[in-house]
Amino acid sequence: MKYTERSRTDLLREQEECRAKYEELKARGLKLDMSRGQPGKEQLDLVSDILTVLADPADCVVDGTDVRNYGAFSGLPGAKALFAEILGCRPEECFIGGNASLNLMYDTISKAYTHGLLHSEKPWCRLEKVRFLCPSPGYDRHFRITESFGAELITVEMTPAGPDMDQVEELVKDPAVKGIWCVPKYSNPDGIIYSGETVRRLAGLKPAAPDFLLMWDNAYCVHEFEGDFVPFPDILSLCREAGNPDMVFEFASTSKITFPGAGISVMAASEANQKYMQKLTGVQTIGYDKVNQLRHVKYLKDRAGTLALMKKHAAILGPKYRMVLDTLEREIADLGIAEWQKPKGGYFVSVNTMDGIAKRTLALCRDAGVVMTPAGATFPYGVDPRDRNVRVAPSLPPVEELRQAMEVFCVSMRLAALEKLLG
Amino acid sequence: MKYTERSRTDLLREQEECRAKYEELKARGLKLDMSRGQPGKEQLDLVSDILTVLADPADCVVDGTDVRNYGAFSGLPGAKALFAEILGCRPEECFIGGNASLNLMYDTISKAYTHGLLHSEKPWCRLEKVRFLCPSPGYDRHFRITESFGAELITVEMTPAGPDMDQVEELVKDPAVKGIWCVPKYSNPDGIIYSGETVRRLAGLKPAAPDFLLMWDNAYCVHEFEGDFVPFPDILSLCREAGNPDMVFEFASTSKITFPGAGISVMAASEANQKYMQKLTGVQTIGYDKVNQLRHVKYLKDRAGTLALMKKHAAILGPKYRMVLDTLEREIADLGIAEWQKPKGGYFVSVNTMDGIAKRTLALCRDAGVVMTPAGATFPYGVDPRDRNVRVAPSLPPVEELRQAMEVFCVSMRLAALEKLLG
């Protein structure tokens, strides 16, 4: 029965029970981390063979290129082909980066500020005002990039179909609005897949800014942990068809396919964008680590090889997400104090509590030894106006630890709700 | 006998001989590349063991950190210790980057423009004018970074002891002069080691700009190809002692120790600078490739291990540089048409021809199948005001090819000089 429908006496009794349970859990002296989307050790062990896939000099030559030496600035053809097949774009639309797509995203925004993009009238650092759209809850590191450059962050509501497109279409009429952050498949943190209509409306935007930037972080493009691979449209084609060929920059990486922090990344964009950006990037680097690119090409081979590996990750991750969702269902669903999506991929479960108790919930968790992503982190400037969103990142701990962490989380949320309701 | 002291008849006969020799060389249909400081295959094969130094999960854990997962943003302690020992600075002054120190240099300048440095009054993009000192001949990629951001490049004369310090000390009185590019040991391309006095005067500069940037690219810190390792002072200590603790950013990498483009890099700077810059860099990346950092730590071990490897590189490189220097000595020295340093380390031999014939010399080379770094590349904006500097990069070709390439180069230079002298 919902808390809001219960009597005060009932709630007081519930509070006493919750307190007792909380104290009991706290006494266990837990030390559990669910703060970041980190793969667990079992997942890392899955990909050990990549360490030795290049074992001697002969392994390092591909298509006549010795990957141990300088050259192939924009990436190995094999690495471009791999990402193009996964994303559905063309190999010539791919630029292969280092160990983090975040770095490629930062560099894109940074170059927009210092040099301007292909269709910029001037570098953004010369503009009075730059605004950037942040569908929220979203990824804190995205928001922080644009914040760091001084852009004004505008919160856009997330719906179960992706960003609220009515709001987006209205906002882009402002020429100071220069772009939007998107995680289109298994969005961070909601785990939502943008609907076909949302994607089409994004590709067909008619922004006032000629250099509007659709930042398309396809971080979880092959990251199903439940069920089969879900195909997703190629945003580059959709933008091209909608007359916006140069509006989108798409990003992906192998951080959660092979090793986080030791994978390879891609920036996919129109050939006109590639030509323009690569001229700027050519000043910055002689090229990213091709030895590691070749490791990935030899190890993953192609989309089929990648999807086969992702099935193995899913076998490890699936039970963790089920543990989170089942515990929420069992402990919270009936109480009317929170809602959440039931994602089938990505790295998070996003819980929206009743207004005003997210911070308190996480403070209680922390006191009981369970660290979560700080409340507010999923909103621009780290401030959740309704103080209700909590990002649960269950990938790192083993299932048994997770069970305990979720018990702590649920009882903490109940306590916070009761405190609020009882005043 | 010097060309300038010979009779016209003599020179005409010499020209005929040179032409015949040139045509004979040209007829061989050579295709030789001495344009970039690339290690040769034999050098790459030296370090093959690094490919498999991490072979299974247990190898990937160091000091309790699993390098396959996220974390250790500023670099592995072992990687910091390795570079600190090599450079003579402190581990806590080191930030470990990706596969290219060039990228760290670019990012430093880029952040100066977008966010400002520790002692900047404002980001450089907000300034009317930024000037940058470019000791020339120098490294084209350095100059291009500052050029790309719109800085005005000021040429500073190189002397056998390093940049002309009288000129530098005068120029830094201008508050718009924001920094200087230096390759202090085996400078690119001259192969000069800055003298103790030059280094002390650089560390003790009193620039008008509070955020003056000493860009210290110690690219060839352990790169002797002749004789023993030459110790070199730690610039961070010298700047600290001179009251300029935050003025210098030092860079180095393993690009020419292990694999070019697949090594690791370092930015060394005062702890105050590290604190300031790492806050900015933390927005850009979660951290660079630690798996590759650990590969390098396990493979190189320490300074002694690194120097032992560099001795093996020297055994391959030494004969190549001797071939270049011996051929110049034999073919050119007596003619009075060029001068050059005789470096014992680094990656280049820099030849200053008589004025006005560098371009013509390299055009003749190219027509005979020998590609060199374009004339002018070693000066700001790619323009050598006296058209005389040629950068010879003999590391890639085998000695026998190099012998032929140097024959082409010398006869081309003689032809160009004769054309000039005969009018």
Image (cartoon, coloured by chain):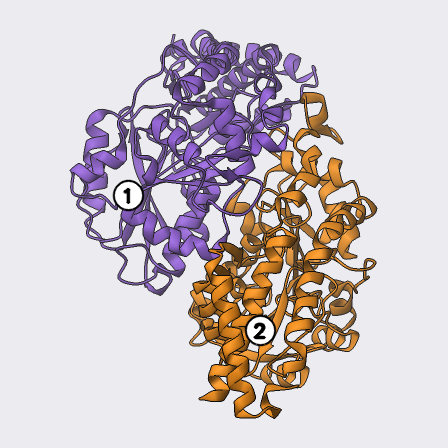
Chain colours: A purple, B orange
Mark 2 or 1: in front is 2
Q: Quadrant of the N terminus of chain A?
A: top left
Q: Is residue B380 visible?
A: yes
Decide which of B58, A185 is in the foreground and name it: B58
Decide which of A243, B225 is in the foreground and name it: B225
Residue to which mark 1 is pinned? A270
Residue B213 position, x and y percent, is 60, 68
Relative to A232, B109 lies left or right? right
Decide which of A338, B135 is in the foreground and name it: B135
Chain letter of mark 2 equals B
Q: Is residue A374 visible?
A: no
Q: What is the three-letter code of the residue carrying label 1?
A: Ser
Q: Residues within 10 Å of mark 2 (few under 14, many from 20)?
A: many
Residue to which mark 2 is pinned? B137
Same subunit: marks 2 and 1 = no
Q: Residues within 10 Å of mark 1 (few under 14, many from 20)?
A: many
B278 versus A123 height, above or below: above
**Helix, strand, or loop for circle 2?**
loop
Residue B357 position, x and y percent, is 49, 79
Decide which of B337, A310 is in the foreground and name it: B337
Cα distance between the residues tagged 2 and 1: 38 Å
Q: What is the three-letter code of the residue carrying label 2?
A: Pro
A210 versus A6 height, above or below: below
- Label ID, residue A172: none
